[in-house]
Amino acid sequence: MKAAELPTIVSTFRDIKDRAESHWRELRDNSKAVIMVGTATCGRAAGAMEVLKALRDEVKKRNLDCPVIEVGCMGHCYSEPNVTITKPGYPPICYAHVNPVIAERLIKEFILGDDPCLEFVLAAAEENDLVPSFSDFPRAQYEKKVVLKNCGQIDPQQIEHYIAHGGYAALSKALQMRPEDIIDEVKRSGLRGRGGAGFPTGQKWETCRYAAGRSKYIICNGDEGDPGAFMDRAIIESDPHSVLEGMIIAGYAVGARYGYIYVRAEYPLAVHRAEIALRQAQKLNLLGKNILGSDFSFDIKTFQGSGAFVCGEETALIESLEGKPGLPYNRPPYPATRGLNGKPTVINNVKTLASICHIIENGAEWFASIGTDGSKGTAVFALAGKVVNTGLAEVPMGTTLRQVIFDVGSGIPNGKRFKAVQIGGPSGGCLPESALDLPIDFDSLTDAGAMMGSGGMIVLDEDDCMVEIARYFLEFTQRESCGKCTFCRLGTKQMLEVLDEITKGKGRIEDIDMLMELAQDIKAGSLCGLGKTAPNPVLTTLRHFRDEYEAHILEGRCPALMCADLITYYIIPEKCERSCDACVGTCTVEAISPNKQRIKVIDQEKCVKCGTCLTACPPQYNAVIKVSPPSEVPAPKKGKTRK
Amino acid sequence: MALNKDKRMAEEQAEFKQQTKQILKRFGRKRSNLIPILQKVQGKLGYLPREAMLEIAEFLNMPDIDVYSVVTFYNQFRLNPPGKHSIRVCLGTACHMKGGYITLDAWKRRLEIEPSETTPDREFDLDTVACVGCCTMAPVTVVDNKPQGKVEPTKVDGLLLGFELERKKQKPGGQLPTDEA
């Protein structure tokens, strides 16, 4: 950077920041209430758009000076739709499970009146004397928000909000540094790629910087194909500028001119918000020619992935960007030396890029002080499955699985027992209770047979069958295998057939050895990560839950009562209440009818085992049960007529 | 009658060609534009008819089979016309463990079609999706691009009833019945 440019960058950025801050102050000037509605996809699925409309209508109808803005996801997805109201004289209060009726009441009673409607409160965003705050939650002592800092706090569609919260300061700082120094900073921070493999980011950048070739590319990998993971979606939807800023800094550091944000087409909202963010950044000259008056130019485009899991693999991703089917190719050469269009290319995960601005701003030492020896910084997890507080959590590396599941996630709902946690999606594995005290970092999880993956964490309880989950993941990888390598294409198919038989109770005991053997061959004979890790779910479940496989094979019994072919629904006549018809009405295939004594009986011929009757049967009777193996069901007594 | 049908098909094909050409105007003749073009064309036509693919292959100066290979490789692209309402059942891990496969069974049973098919009256098309990232609302079904949380067999019936009522409401309004002969 030429010395003459430095003052330009500083003053240009100061102007932008001043304007953004005054914009933010105007919104939050403490004279009026501000309503924030979380409208990321998770909120929308719970009805946030209806709530937003109800609030806006009400504000308009009553002619209130009260901005209603959209924000991203706070991570408390279990309590969506979330609405946060900041009213002068009160702490910012977050409400849970808001619907249009509650929304109307909040306006009438809290905004107009003085009743903060405590019955709907989730928590306050700040400590205060009125309501408990998020910092009083048990999870607060484990959480450390770095990447998720802005999520749910700012409107992702207004760049001013991001800048007012310290955004793009790192870019301005980076542009005043030498690219080599930025790479050095990232290297010293110990940041490892958050896409799953954990490759040191600084090293990747360095390779790319010194690779031959004039045009280079930065690609943000947002092809979050892992079923059960939604961190990248939430970040792009809630704080897209943090990703852009990371990309621009990366571009400056390695000397790239163009960048792509590769987002799955299944995430239309993320694509939309990324595009808005790009336009806004261009307008303020944070993107485009001569960024902030420096001699560095950089442009970013979005690209929608077309729904192929394998495209999360970097070489397959490049192929699809070039307009070809996403078949991975052999490495080396790594994309950092020869990638998109044959040019050096850095491909980083969304969370990796979102961490960059924090490293530049706070320094490598600060980042390296978080986490464990081998894995620095924080880990973002998407908690889902059988856990009370589903949602997003960011904890320092080295936090144990137990802390994440039981303290952050508040444990298993409905008093059920924990069975396993599935980490890393189809490439990862299932860890049993004995592994719960493992610290979460790249190395310890790999040692345990699972892997960090991109951060999806599915909690399984006693009702989940481990053979079935292994079969599920294999079905997924088998379907998504691109077909290039024989072992991956045919081996996964073979394994799936074996598992299918086992879940139907037709397995043979030798099948277990065959599965192990096939798993080794597939791992050895596949080119890319998909094939190399595809057998992991089977291997880990076999290692930790072999007894369940044996129960399926030897006894025709599914211990978790999940495999449809091995269970039967049965109504215990002694428990069935004659005056109650709850199950009869809800049965989706009309398979339940009362007999002469008005005791309900299931017609096993018609039953599709959907479980609706089990849910419908009132808890005071609890007459519907699942039985495995089906032969355990007592035969209907003679003389009873159905219908 | 048969003549009429042929004529209608020819008209439809010409229309597809025309609309594909319109979209192609906005793109350069680079292979890397293939996927964005396919996405735009499918966005407009609802699926990728043969005529559109041929048109695209010609525009990008590449073999027809290569366009077809890309279309069939990616899950996003479809080769048959969609229904009026799209039903996408999420089969992500969380949805699966909470009974997504039971929900899929319920849709199949009610609509009487298999995934990636369209009902004969072109009202509904059914498909599965790997994960829509709403794992906390599992099991999820995306109905007309809106993710619906906690869709169990009873809610499937409820959603279908909603469409039924809407159709009944529209009928007396004088909407012409479509001739699907």
Image (spheres, rainbow, N blue to C red):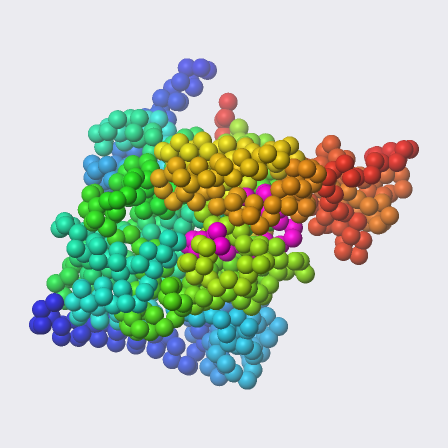
A472 shown above or below A115: above
Image-quadrant location for residue A65 = bottom left
Residue at x-position 25% and y-position 68%:
A185
Q: Nearer the viewer, residue A90 or A457?
A: A457
Residue at x-position 35% and y-position 39%:
A527
Image-quadrant location for residue A161 = bottom left
Residue at x-position 9% and y-position 72%:
A3
A223 shown above or below A148: above
Is any atom of residue B134 visible in this view?
no
Is any atom of residue A552 visible in this view?
yes
Q: Is residue A407 left or right of residue B33?
A: right
All told, the count of numbered labels is: 0
Q: Position of residue A366 (x, y in %)?
A: 33, 74
Q: Is residue A393 magenta?
A: no
Q: Nearer the viewer, residue A311 or A303?
A: A311
Region in magenta:
A448-470
Locate the N terminus of chain A and report the quarter of the image it occupies: bottom left
Q: Position of residue B104 (x, y in %)?
A: 57, 40
Q: Position of residue A281 (x, y in %)?
A: 26, 62
Q: Is residue B169 left or right of residue A490?
A: right
Residue most extreme to the right: A639
Q: Is residue A505 left or right of residue A263?
A: right
Q: Is residue A458 magenta?
A: yes
Q: Position of residue B27 (x, y in %)?
A: 23, 40
A49 shown above or below A608: below
Residue at x-position 38% and y-position 38%:
A526
Locate the C terminus of chain A and report the quarter of the image it occupies: top right
Q: Is residue A637 left or right of residue B58?
A: right
